Amino acid sequence: MSVETHGHSNPHHEHPDVVGSRNRLGVILILVADIAMALSVLFVYFYLKGQNVNDMWLPAATEDSPAILALSSKGTWYITALAGLGAAAHFYGLKGARAKNATQLVLGGGVALVFSIAALVYQFMQISSAPFTTTSGAYASCYFLIAGLNALHLVLTVFIALGNWNRSRLGIYAADHWHVDIVNVWWIWMTVSSLLGAFALSFA
C-alpha cells in the first residue's frame, strides 16, 4: 500500500496585495467618518459665529469676568506648517520605499516622526496657554473643540509615525511597502484637517 503525499498551500494565507487592499478600505472608511466630523465642527463654528446668540460668541466684560478676546491664529498656522513638513518628510521616505532605498525610507520616517512630535507639543502649549475655558462663550468652546480634535489627530500621527519608522528601521518594508502608502494618506488628511482648523480660527 502506497501513500501519496500532496503539497497543499495554507488555505488561510492571503496575498499581501489582498491584505493591503482590505486595510486601505478600512483606512478610507475611518477617514470618511473623520472628515464628516471635522466638517461638522467647522459648520458649528461658523454657524455659532454667525448667530452670535445674546452676544455670547465673544462675551463682553462683566463685573465677574473680563471680556473674552479671540486668540491670534498664528499658532495654529505654525502647527499646520509643522504638519505639512512632516507629511513632506514621510512622502520623501515613501519615495525611498518605492525605489527600494531603505536609508531614505528610514530617514524620511524619522524626520516625519520628529515633526509630528513637535506639532503635538506646540498644540498642547497652545491649548494650555489659552486665557479662557470651555464655558467662556461660544468662541472659546469652538476653539477647544477644534484644537482638541487637532491634538487627537496629532497623537494618532505620532503613534503611527513611530510605528512606521520602527518597522522601516527593522527592514519590514523591504519587500512590500503598502503600509507606508496608507500612512501617507493619513498624513495628507491630518495636514488638511489642521489647515481647515487654522483657516476657521482666522475668522474669529
Image (cartoon, rainbow, N blue to C red):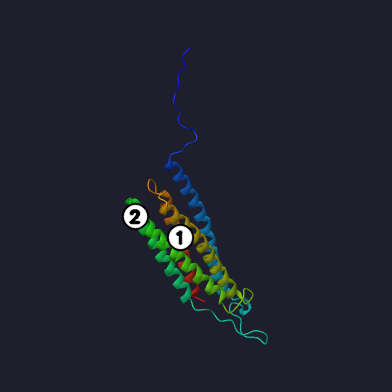
Residue type at the position of mark 2? Gly
Above or below: residue 64 compared with residue 38: below
Q: Position of residue 106 (x, y in %)?
A: 38, 57
Above or below: residue 45 compared with residue 4: below
Which label's residue is closer to the chain start, 1 or 2?
2
Q: Are marks 1 and 2 in contact (CB under 8 Å)?
A: no
Q: Residue 95 vs residue 38: left or right?
A: left
Counting every numbered tag in the picture gives: 2
Occupied quadrant, residue 89: bottom left
Q: Position of residue 40 (x, y in %)?
A: 55, 63
Q: Position of residue 12 (x, y in %)?
A: 50, 35
Residue 187 or residue 41, whichever sits in front: 187
For image coordinates 46% across by 14% down, the residue present is 2
* Disc 1 secondary structure class: helix
* Disc 2 secondary structure class: helix
Q: Which residue is mark 1?
A: 189
For image coordinates 41% across by 65% down, the residue present is 84
Residue 83 or residue 1, whichever sits in front: 1
Evaluate whether residue 4 shows in this view.
Answer: yes
Occupied quadrant, residue 70: bottom right
Residue 65 or residue 174, whichever sits in front: 174
Q: Which residue is mark 2?
A: 96
How busy is the neighbourhood of tag 2: few (under 14 within 10 Å), some, or many (20 plus)? some
Front of the two marks 1 and 2: 2
Above or below: residue 9 compared with residue 38: above
Q: Position of residue 6 (x, y in %)?
A: 44, 23
For image coordinates 40% across by 66% down, the residue present is 85
Residue type at the position of mark 1? Trp
Outermost residue on the right side: it is 64
Above or below: residue 17 compared with residue 2: below
